[in-house]
């Protein structure tokens, strides 16, 4: 086995091994569980840094073996893999710190953190998958790993949300399975290829390709919450805040969006999809989802549900960028994959702090909370302004490139979608900020549970401050060679051969 293959295997094992071991840790052995959690997250991040530098230098990283004749299991690292896996590694470490503090006095912590690590293991496998077969394996394992996290509390609402989650995701999984099998029958088990590998079939199997593409978009569309396949996501907000943060920022919804990127760019290719008259359909679907999600967010009174519908809208920016079929829009979509993750995890961390510290769950309970929890609210403000797209926040960078990409390919109407979405973002975020900073505080908070020297426990406070800082720097320092935007430009350079 080559050094590259060993490194990929170690990155997978860095989250798989701690996850399996944690299941056998007794509930009262808190320190051992924390050591396993933190060591796995830190080791994974260090290994990903090594991988990142290797890919930047043009080194080859792959692990491959045949499962059946003509069917290979392939792990491969390219620039697109790095964008996703680096986000996963950084946010796993931060979320682990947050979850340790959040669940300090909760039952079933070993079960939670075991599945939590397995969730990251499957997400890592999705990032490193080198072909559709490997992608499918980890994609379906992700469903099994996240279901116990959704139903962790064991309440009637969480069990109901878990059932709905399984119905949606397993249904999408069946559609994806049919699509993968069909493509393997048509073209064999091919590796992901920039520009796609199915172009040679144009004019020969057009009807089959159209059907299979629709099935696979349905499969990926469930997890990426494309309308009308989004219904599970707001219901899953009954899960603990660390789970909500993970689902929205790096795991499930991001895995679906990443799958759409792979499908469009590295399997079909934009040229073939334009020839088949399919690309515009997905572009319209993403646009509808962006507006619909924003409108539904505006109607919500529960903080986490408002953020959930915001995710429905914001994640579709990634699909929008990749289906614009131009390099500038593609850059914007890929950059938003990271930008949205940083901003949204910040918002969910803050929502969790409000709930855990003061028992605040509804927007009408936020009056004056900025005076009681100024640092948490400052982080929330950074995330909210970034979602609106206020310069120089990371969200502005994404939207600017998406708008420029729309002009580049002659789809000016997309700019109207972006403007409308930003206006709706303002309508459902600015009143929250006004309540928190300018209205007088409530005489008594719903349920003040945590009284510490700081506004809340440091393990809950430091993670949103860190991710808010990253979201701010991603916009302010977008011109640097190490920024998410620069890495998105590198991927685009390789995909479009600019």
Image (cartoon, grey):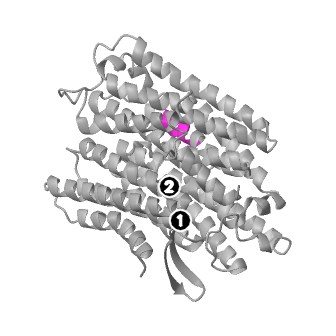
Q: Tell me the SS state at disc 2.
A: helix
Q: Quadrant of residue 351?
A: top left
User: Across the whole image, how many numbered discs are drawn on residues?
Assistant: 2
Quadrant the C terminus occupies: bottom right
Which residue is under mark 2?
A: 84
Measuring from the top left, give residue 131's x and y in whole percent.
Answer: 58, 71
Which residue is under mark 1?
A: 58
Measuring from the top left, give residue 213's x and y in whole percent.
Answer: 71, 63
Measuring from the top left, give residue 335's x and y in whole percent.
Answer: 57, 45
Q: What residue is drawn where x is 30% and y is 60%? A: 43
* Residue farthest front in this picture: 57
Q: What residue is drawn where x is 39% and y is 25%? A: 378
Q: Quadrant of residue 274?
A: bottom right
Quadrant the N terminus occupies: bottom left
> Viewer-nearest of labels 2 and 1?
1
Q: Quadrant of residue 214?
A: bottom right
Highlighted range, magenta? 305-312
Q: Nearer the viewer, residue 230 or 64?
A: 64
- Position of 427 with respect to 454 (left or right) is right
């Amino acid at each position: 086995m080559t050094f590259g293959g060993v490194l990929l295997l170690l990155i997978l094992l860095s989250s798989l091994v701690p996850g399996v071991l944690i299941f056998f840790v007794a509930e009262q052995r808190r320190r051992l569980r924390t050591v396993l959690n933190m060591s796995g997250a830190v080791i994974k991040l260090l290994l990903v840094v090594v991988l990142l530098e290797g890919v930047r230098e043009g080194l080859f990283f792959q692990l491959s073996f045949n499962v059946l004749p003509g069917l290979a299991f392939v792990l491969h690292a390219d620039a697109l893999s790095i964008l996703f896996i680096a986000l996963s590694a950084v946010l796993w470490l931060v979320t682990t710190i947050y979850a340790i503090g959040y669940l300090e006095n909760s039952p079933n912590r070993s079960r939670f953190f075991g599945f939590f690590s397995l969730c990251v293991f499957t997400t890592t496998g999705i990032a490193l998958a080198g072909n559709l077969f490997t992608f499918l394996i980890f994609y379906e394992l992700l469903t099994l790993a996240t279901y116990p996290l959704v139903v962790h509390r064991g309440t009637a609402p969480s069990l109901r949300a878990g059932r709905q989650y399984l119905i949606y995701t397993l249904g999408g999984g069946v559609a994806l399975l049919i699509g993968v099998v069909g493509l393997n029958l048509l073209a064999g088990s091919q590796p992901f290829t920039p520009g796609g590998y199915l172009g040679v079939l144009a004019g020969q199997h057009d009807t089959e390709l159209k059907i299979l593409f629709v099935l696979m978009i349905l499969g990926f569309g469930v997890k990426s919450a494309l309308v009308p396949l989004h219904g599970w996501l707001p219901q899953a907000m009954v899960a603990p805040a660390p789970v909500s943060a993970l689902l929205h920022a790096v795991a499930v919804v991001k895995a679906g969006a990443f799958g759409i990127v792979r499908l469009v760019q590295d399997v079909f290719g934009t040229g073939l999809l334009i020839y088949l008259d399919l690309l515009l359909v997905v572009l319209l679907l993403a646009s509808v989802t962006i507006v619909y999600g924003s409108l539904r967010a505006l109607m919500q009174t529960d903080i986490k549900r408002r953020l959930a519908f915001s995710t429905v809208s914001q994640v579709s920016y990634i699909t929008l960028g990749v289906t614009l079929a131009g390099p500038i829009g593609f850059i914007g979509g890929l950059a938003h994959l990271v930008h949205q993750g940083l901003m949204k995890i910040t918002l969910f961390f803050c929502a969790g702090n409000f709930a855990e510290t003061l028992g605040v769950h509804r927007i009408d309970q936020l009056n004056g909370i900025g005076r009681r929890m100024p640092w948490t609210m400052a982080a929330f403000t950074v995330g909210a302004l970034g979602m609106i797209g206020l310069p120089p926040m990371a969200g502005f960078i994404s939207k600017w490139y998406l708008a420029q990409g729309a002009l580049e390919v002659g789809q000016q109407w997309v700019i109207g979608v972006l403007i409308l979405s930003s206006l709706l973002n303002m309508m459902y975020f600015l009143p929250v900020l006004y309540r928190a900073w300018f209205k007088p505080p409530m005489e008594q908070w719903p349920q003040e549970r945590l009284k510490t020297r700081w506004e809340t426990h440091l393990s809950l406070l430091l993670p949103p401050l860190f991710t808010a800082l990253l979201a701010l720097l991603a916009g302010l320092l977008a011109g640097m060679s190490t920024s998410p935007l620069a890495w998105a430009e590198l991927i685009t350079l390789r995909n479009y051969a600019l």
